[in-house]
Image (cartoon, rainbow, N blue to C red):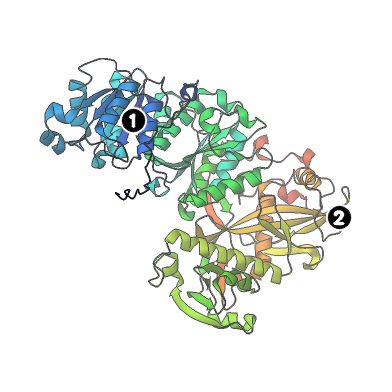
């Protein structure tokens, strides 16, 4: 009797099935182009077949249904995953695509020699595929050699055949590689908004972002109009923008200018493969469901409820996406914003006006950053480290700090502490630490910024300041009543005059104490600069902030309505003077040693000044708070320029 054969089980991979999208999802809406717009005849898709996945390629064919497929590879192959030439050509037939092999037309060797030359490839396509047609309708898909799948090739090719499209080509590169490093030399934050209705928000946001170190471009001061104006906008979005921020109000969604800017930005986002290139902001009570489709699919940051919390979320996004920020360049940008904003007013004169920016620059770092190891299981390092008051940041199972291991030993008692390495602070900030090659410059800057933040909070606690948690998640620090002698602090102004300011006061009419509070944090991506943001906190007992956020907000709006920029400038200067203890330096303790920043705000000069003879340039006496003991005649002639130092006669 014959023994039956042994039958083995084997895994059979099912054939890949294309992802079928609902055709309705690809209908073109007014002012909106979807990712694959089947009804959009201007879609020009560039495919890097060496990088695309099987399912993504099939989904592309089914969803976009290209009328023309042009293969610009010298040796066309379709063996990706379970694909083969027969299956792909069957798909071409099913979706109604006409396939053109350029190598078969001009010869493999000739095509290989010009594969990365957009102009020559375009010439072949126009002669052999379009055959001199004056109008060509897409979608058109072009399969490229890997070397040709570049932004330069795509832009040049699209421009060379632009004349055969009725409305110009919308380019898309697939696969879309999500990345942040692709920003390259892009450094500008472009703010798209409805002019002039949403100008106040755009102006505020532009100032806040500039003060955080970002280079900002807005159009509320550039109302020249015409083709040259759009050319400038297009150049910024195409070549300079790192982010396009859309102030998406109800009105903005009806403005053709905003819709054009968003459409171009979405196109660039897909072509370049930039993750979160377009960032929509909800700035009024428009429901999310009413956002246009090309914005609705994105993570919308809500500014409607609270501008401060919205700004915090936006800055966090910029930091995570590594948007370039530079204190020096952005200082000049702040000056430009002031200059351009003043020029939109009639009451200005061509006279330089000194300006103070609420930035403090580094004077001295501690000499080195130390890596400290603890003799405790790795999963316990974080919990143990939280019992230490020394500023530190966990990193790869160690603690990074400006203090050496010996300083930690005193606080950790019986836990063993050892030194795992040290590096000069400047080298650390540059990401050059041979012992830890994985440390990149952007991460090093974030670690140092974290250490600075901890050092400031430790210093504030040691100096008897009280903490108030803001809606944005940051903290502001203030004096309780009578902690500061006389509740005042003296300071020397820019003209060398000794002055003083109350940092705590009591309103008889409102029966509350007001307290000046400072939020101090490192500039985004640049810990060499501290930003000092002023706030006002209210208490009923001089110690504990009001629990009602609504009451706090109402008091702030009413009580501070007559506080012009010069007053905020002086309050910051008085606060910093007290912190510096007349030494001109803000010293932040880090355990063993200290970080030193200048205690004087950065000085700039605005080329124009408000006209002091014009009614717009002076506060209205009628709105001054009658029971505010700080109001006096000396203040009434101050310039209204942002944080201006120019004083009235």
Between 494 and 268, which is closer to the camera in this rendering? 268
Residue in view at x 61 percent, y 52 percent: 645
Query: Is 318 situated above or below 602?
Result: above
Q: Residue sitting at 61 percent across and 72 percent down? A: 385
Task: Using residue 176 as the reference point, say whether residue 254 is left or right of it.
Answer: right
Could you tell me residue 137's position as x and y percent?
Answer: 32, 18
Give the camera-side residue of 523 and 390.
Answer: 390
Q: Quadrant of residue 573?
A: bottom right
Q: Is residue 67 visible?
A: no
Marker disc for residue 413: none
Q: Is residue 492 left or right of residue 446?
A: right
Q: Earlier in the sequence, mark 1 or mark 2?
A: 1
Question: Picture coordinates of residue 364 (x, y %)?
Answer: 51, 70
In-front residue for pair 148/406: 148
Q: Which residue is mark 1?
A: 45
User: Disc 1 versus disc 2: distance between alpha carbons?
Assistant: 64 Å
Q: Secondary structure at mark 2?
A: loop
Residue with the mark numbered 2: 540
Measuring from the top left, give residue 598's x and y in whole percent.
56, 65
Q: Nearer the viewer, residue 101 or 58?
A: 58
């Amino acid at each position: 009797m014959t023994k039956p054969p042994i039958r083995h089980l084997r895994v059979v991979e099912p054939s890949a099935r294309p992802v079928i999208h609902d055709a309705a999802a690809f209908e073109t809406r007014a002012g909106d182009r979807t990712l694959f717009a089947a009804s959009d005849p201007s879609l020009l898709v560039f495919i890097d077949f060496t990088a695309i996945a099987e399912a993504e390629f099939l989904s592309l064919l089914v969803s976009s249904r290209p009328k023309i497929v042009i293969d610009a590879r010298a040796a066309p192959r379709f063996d990706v995953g379970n694909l083969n030439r027969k299956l792909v050509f069957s798909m071409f037939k099913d979706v109604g695509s006409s396939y053109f092999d350029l190598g078969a037309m001009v010869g493999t060797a000739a095509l290989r020699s010009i594969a990365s030359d957009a102009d020559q490839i375009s010439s072949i396509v126009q002669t052999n595929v379009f055959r001199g047609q004056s109008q060509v309708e897409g979608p058109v898909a072009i399969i490229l050699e890997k070397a040709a799948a570049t932004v330069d090739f795509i832009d040049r090719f699209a421009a060379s055949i632009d004349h055969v499209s009725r409305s110009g080509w919308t380019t898309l590169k697939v696969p879309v590689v999500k990345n942040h490093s692709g920003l390259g030399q892009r450094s500008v934050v472009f703010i798209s908004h409805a002019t002039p209705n949403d100008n106040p928000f755009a102006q505020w946001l532009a100032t806040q972002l500039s003060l955080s170190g970002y280079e900002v471009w807005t159009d509320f001061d550039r109302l020249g109009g015409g083709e040259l104006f759009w050319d400038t906008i297009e150049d910024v979005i195409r070549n300079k923008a790192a982010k396009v921020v859309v102030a998406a109000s109800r009105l903005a969604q009806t403005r053709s200018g905003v819709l054009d800017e968003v459409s171009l930005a979405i196109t660039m986002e897909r072509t370049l493969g930039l993750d979160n290139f377009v960032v929509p902001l909800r700035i009024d009570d428009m429901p999310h469901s009413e956002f246009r489709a090309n914005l609705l699919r994105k993570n919308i940051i809500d500014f409607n409820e609270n501008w401060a919390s919205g700004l915090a979320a936006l800055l966090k996004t910029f930091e995570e996406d590594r948007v370039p920020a530079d204190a020096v360049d952005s200082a000049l940008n702040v000056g430009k914003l002031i200059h351009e904003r003043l020029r939109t007013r009639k009451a200005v004169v061509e006279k330089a006006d000194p300006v103070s920016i609420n930035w403090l620059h580094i004077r001295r770092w501690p000499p080195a950053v130390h890596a400290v190891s603890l003799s405790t299981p790795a999963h316990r390092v974080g919990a143990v480290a939280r019992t230490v008051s020394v500023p530190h940041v966990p990193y790869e199972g160690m603690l990074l700090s400006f203090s050496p291991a010996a300083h930690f030993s005193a606080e950790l008692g019986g836990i063993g502490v050892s030194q795992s390495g040290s590096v000069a602070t400047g080298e650390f900030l540059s990401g050059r630490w041979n012992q830890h090659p994985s440390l990149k410059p952007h991460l090093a800057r974030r670690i140092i910024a974290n250490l600075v933040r901890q050092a400031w909070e430790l210093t504030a606690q040691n100096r008897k300041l009280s903490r108030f948690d803001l809606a944005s998640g940051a903290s502001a620090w203030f004096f309780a009543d009578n902690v500061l002698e006389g509740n005042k602090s003296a300071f020397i102004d820019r003209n060398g005059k000794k002055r003083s300011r109350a940092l705590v006061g009591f309103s008889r009419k409102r029966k509350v104490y007001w307290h000046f509070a400072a939020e101090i944090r490192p500039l985004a991506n640049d810990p060499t600069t501290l930003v000092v943001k002023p706030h006002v906190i209210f208490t009923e007992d001089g110690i504990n902030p009001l629990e009602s956020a609504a009451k706090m907000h109402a008091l702030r709006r009413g009580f501070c309505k007559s506080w012009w920029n010069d007053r905020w400038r002086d309050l910051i200067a008085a606060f910093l003077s007290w912190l510096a203890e007349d030494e001109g330096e803000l010293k932040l303790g880090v355990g063993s040693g200290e970080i030193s920043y200048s205690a004087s705000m950065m000085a700039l000069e605005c080329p124009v000044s408000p006209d002091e003879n014009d009614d717009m340039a002076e506060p209205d006496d009628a709105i001054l708070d009658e029971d505010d003991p700080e109001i006096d005649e000396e203040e009434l002639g101050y310039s209204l320029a942002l944080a201006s130092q120019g004083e009235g006669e």
